[in-house]
Image (tube, rainbow, N blue to C red):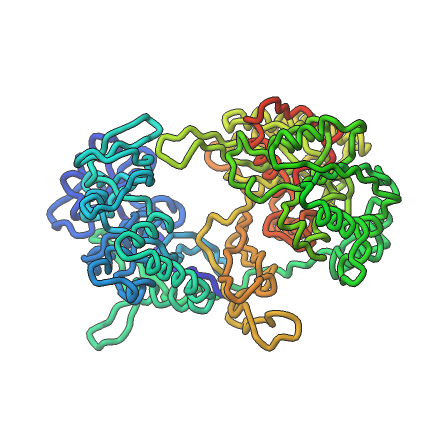
């Protein structure tokens, strides 16, 4: 396996660097005087100085000795500054977009997808170009800690026309979102101007635009504004200056090229080509040699121009699926075939066996709606995956339906039907038009209907009219799975851990609530507190459903854990001396305060031996994995055409160090078509306390990365939204879905989240 990581060679363990005591005034003074030749950066209470091109007689600060890896923050800052200045020296015509991550656009015409389609007067004014991004990372390679650069390539719009130019051309910018461009102090000609999305143009007044912003209406000079670089905005301009037909042709051409641009082989070749340009040079004999990056203080390094071939990995096993309490009914192939053969895991104890289902559909679609319901409940006799239907596959005794018609998609029609029912149903199946997705959250009929039903403690399954008219066995199979879970069922479980007495996996998800995308918009991070699952994947409960602002997160976490602990120890008969392992799947990097929260929990439950780990899971990282031995897999069964060339199989993993691993969740077989490019792996990291912390915590930390990665991989097979494995574990998926729904329903009149804390607590109402 190869990763887009290019190791850095540093030929020493220690280095000398000049430093001065930090003060903002002194840092500003140094940058003002010497910024053209020196780099200055702060670390702690000191200013560190790198002399790249200054005269030998200029001495700033006092020399100190630092360790390459013992003082890695200083080392990494020095590498970034030397790389940046070397790039500017070698390619003086380039203006990088950002210092870090270091980003710049290619200047080659061939890297502009639409160059040949534009008239000369628009070439390089409007473009869809290659954007190169370079980041610095630290990994353990062959038991040795190494710095290295990652390279990634994207395609972004370039639109080099100000609103003043557009106005002079007669193009109407009224109603369009605009950016304000300003150079950061001292960086004109060094970095591209900083752009902020400020609002929408209300009208143009001479040389100015009146912009509706989050701070109110403001006048801005047209020469400082540009339209937001979106497909819609640029398409509108191209339609105006060329023609609508030509604009559509250009936009369609970009779409037709996407699979080629993001094809794994093409992407890998482009990355290697960029590495050659950035990290190598020609010697006097014309031979390609590593480029020496250096400053005048003696710090230097070279960078490999080949991707690192990684071998530090483990074999991740697809879990077996269990369908009875004794674990005698298992299927190692798929959960779907196991359900068909054995029925659901909790069939013996599941209730209700004769659920009452309220079905609300459009009167004009009555025939299609009743046909859909019949196929969902009774199955499709000629299908491969859904012959039994919801009724027999999930071993219901009988499913009782109340079918109600509505004459329109007005929300009051839905609410009237719900209000008039005589007996509370166990579930509701609701037909809605797809246009509901486009409505704002506060007035969206979907959330108003869902909120009304949840207040009655009735989970709901929404189905669009389009799906009802065009359903198939795959759609019905997934809907039936979701319905069983929403009724409180457990379709299957996984083999459980035998290494401790009790193990609980806690998912903490989140959702952003932001008024709009413009500068100054009010925003809150809403935290999903919390989902609890056992090591076999059983959904134990979600603690009191509540969305909290991020500032209240830590207090709420302790309250949630304490309440859930008390409930679980009673229900499952924990005994004094039991070992309890808590593994938190969490959305954010951990601060020491979270460790203090769990430490407080340990103190309150001292009768148990508690271990814990905080594990972050995400795709916000720069790594890509390539399998150079992957020739591709058949597009479909029996096909001779292939897809997924160079894309690793699902479960391929690379351990970057003792706490961090990459896992490819969407492999060659998971690609729906050959037009899909390579996806980023999931980064899994066990977090450990940093800086000043109570060292007593260390004895409680669980740090087995291999165990955590395998468990997390297994948990991607139990989302119960679909039979297909997901990218994220059910713990994170569930808690994030809860947070997202709560944040969207918070503005629905009459909504009260307390309704979720009784009969719905153990039901997957949020799927």
Q: Nearer the viewer, residue 490 or 57?
A: 490
Q: Is residue 459 left or right of residue 33?
A: right
Total numbered badges shown on the rendered structure: 0
Residue visible at 22% across and 46% down in the picture = 170
Q: Nearer the viewer, residue 421 or 686?
A: 421
Residue visible at 52% across and 37% down in the picture = 439
Quadrant location of the C terminus in the rendered image: top right
Q: Is residue 456 left or right of residue 37?
A: right
Residue visible at 81% across and 28% down in the picture = 423
Where is 63 relative to 96, above or below?
above
Q: Is residue 10 visible?
A: no
Q: Position of residue 26 (x, y in %)?
A: 20, 32
Image-quadrant location for residue 609? top right
Q: Position of residue 275 (x, y in %)?
A: 34, 64
Image-quadrant location for residue 60? top left
Q: Nearer the viewer, residue 598 or 254?
A: 254
Q: Is residue 25 visible?
A: yes
Q: Position of residue 525 (x, y in %)?
A: 50, 32
Q: Position of residue 740 (x, y in %)?
A: 57, 36
Image-quadrant location for residue 470? bottom right
């Amino acid at each position: 396996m190869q990763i887009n990581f290019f190791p850095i060679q540093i030929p020493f363990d220690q280095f000398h660097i000049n430093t001065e005591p930090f003060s903002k005034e002194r840092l500003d003074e140094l940058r003002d005087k010497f910024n053209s030749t020196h780099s200055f950066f702060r670390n702690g209470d000191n200013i560190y100085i790198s002399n790249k091109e200054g005269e030998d007689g200029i001495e700033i600060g006092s020399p100190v000795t630092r360790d390459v890896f013992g003082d890695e923050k200083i080392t990494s800052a020095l590498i970034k500054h030397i790389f940046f200045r070397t790039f500017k020296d070698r390619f003086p015509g380039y203006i990088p977009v950002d210092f870090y991550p270091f980003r710049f656009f290619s200047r080659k015409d061939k890297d502009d997808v639409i160059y040949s389609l534009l008239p000369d007067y628009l070439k390089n004014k409007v473009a869809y170009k290659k954007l190169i991004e370079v980041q610095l990372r630290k990994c353990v390679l062959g038991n040795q800690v190494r710095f290295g650069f990652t390279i990634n390539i994207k395609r972004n719009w370039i639109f080099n026309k100000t609103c003043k130019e557009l106005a002079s051309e007669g193009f109407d910018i009224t109603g369009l979102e605009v950016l304000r461009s300003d150079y950061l102090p001292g960086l004109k000609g060094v970095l591209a101007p900083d752009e902020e999305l400020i609002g929408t143009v209300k009208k143009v007044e001479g040389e100015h635009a009146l912009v509706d912003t989050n701070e109110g209406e403001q006048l801005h000079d047209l020469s400082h504004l540009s339209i937001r670089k979106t497909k819609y905005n640029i398409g509108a301009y191209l339609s105006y200056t060329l023609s609508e037909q030509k604009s559509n042709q250009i936009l369609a051409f970009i779409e037709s090229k996407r699979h080629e641009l993001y094809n794994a082989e093409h992407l890998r070749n482009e990355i290697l080509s960029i590495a050659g340009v950035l990290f190598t040079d020609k010697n006097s004999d014309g031979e390609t040699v590593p480029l020496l990056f250096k400053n005048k203080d003696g710090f230097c390094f070279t960078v490999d121009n080949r991707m690192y071939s990684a071998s530090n990995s483990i074999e991740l096993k697809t879990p077996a699926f269990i369908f009875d309490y004794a674990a005698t009914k298992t299927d190692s192939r798929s959960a779907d075939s196991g359900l068909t053969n054995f029925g659901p895991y909790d069939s013996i104890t599941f209730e209700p066996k004769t659920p009452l289902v309220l079905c609300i559909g459009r009167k004009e679609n009555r025939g299609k709606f009743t046909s859909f319901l019949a196929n969902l409940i009774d199955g499709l006799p000629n299908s491969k995956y859904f012959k039994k239907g919801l009724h027999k596959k999930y071993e219901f005794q009988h499913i009782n339906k109340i079918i109600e018609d509505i004459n329109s998609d007005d929300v009051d029609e839905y609410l009237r039907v719900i209000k008039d029912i005589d007996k509370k149903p166990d579930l509701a199946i609701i037909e809605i038009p797809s246009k509901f997705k486009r409505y704002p959250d506060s007035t969206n009929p979907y959330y108003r209907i869902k909120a009304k039903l949840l207040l009655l403690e009735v989970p709901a399954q929404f189905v669009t009219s389009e799906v009802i008219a065009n359903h198939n066995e795959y759609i019905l199979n997934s809907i039936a799975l979701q319905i069983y879970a929403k009724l409180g069922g457990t379709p299957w479980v996984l083999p459980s851990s035998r290494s401790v007495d009790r193990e609980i996996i806690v998912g903490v998800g989140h959702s952003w609530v932001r008024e709009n995308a413009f500068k100054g918009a009010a925003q809150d991070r809403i935290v999903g507190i919390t989902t609890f699952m056992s090591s076999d994947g059983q959904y134990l409960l979600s603690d009191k459903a509540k969305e909290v602002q991020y500032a209240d997160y830590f207090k709420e976490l302790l309250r949630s854990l304490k309440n859930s602990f008390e409930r679980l120890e009673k229900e499952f008969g924990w005994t004094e001396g039991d070992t309890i392992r808590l593994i938190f799947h969490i959305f954010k990097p951990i601060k020491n305060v979270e460790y203090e929260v769990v430490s407080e929990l340990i103190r309150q439950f001292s009768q148990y031996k508690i271990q814990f780990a905080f594990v972050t899971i995400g795709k916000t990282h720069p790594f890509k994995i390539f399998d150079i031995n992957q020739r591709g897999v058949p597009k479909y069964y029996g096909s001779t055409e292939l897809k997924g060339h160079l894309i690793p199989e699902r479960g391929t993993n690379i351990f970057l160090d003792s706490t961090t691993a990459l896992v490819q969740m969407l492999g060659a077989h998971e690609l729906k078509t050959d037009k899909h490019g390579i996806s980023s792996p999931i980064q899994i990291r066990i977090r450990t306390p940093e800086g000043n912390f109570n060292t007593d915590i260390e004895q409680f930390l669980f740090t087995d990365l291999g165990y955590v990665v395998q468990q997390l991989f297994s948990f991607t097979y139990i989302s119960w939204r679909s039979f297909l494995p997901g990218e994220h574990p059910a713990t994170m998926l569930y808690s994030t879905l809860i947070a997202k729904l709560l944040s969207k329903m918070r503005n629905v009149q009459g909504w009260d989240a307390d309704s979720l804390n009784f009969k719905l607590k153990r039901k997957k109402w949020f799927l």
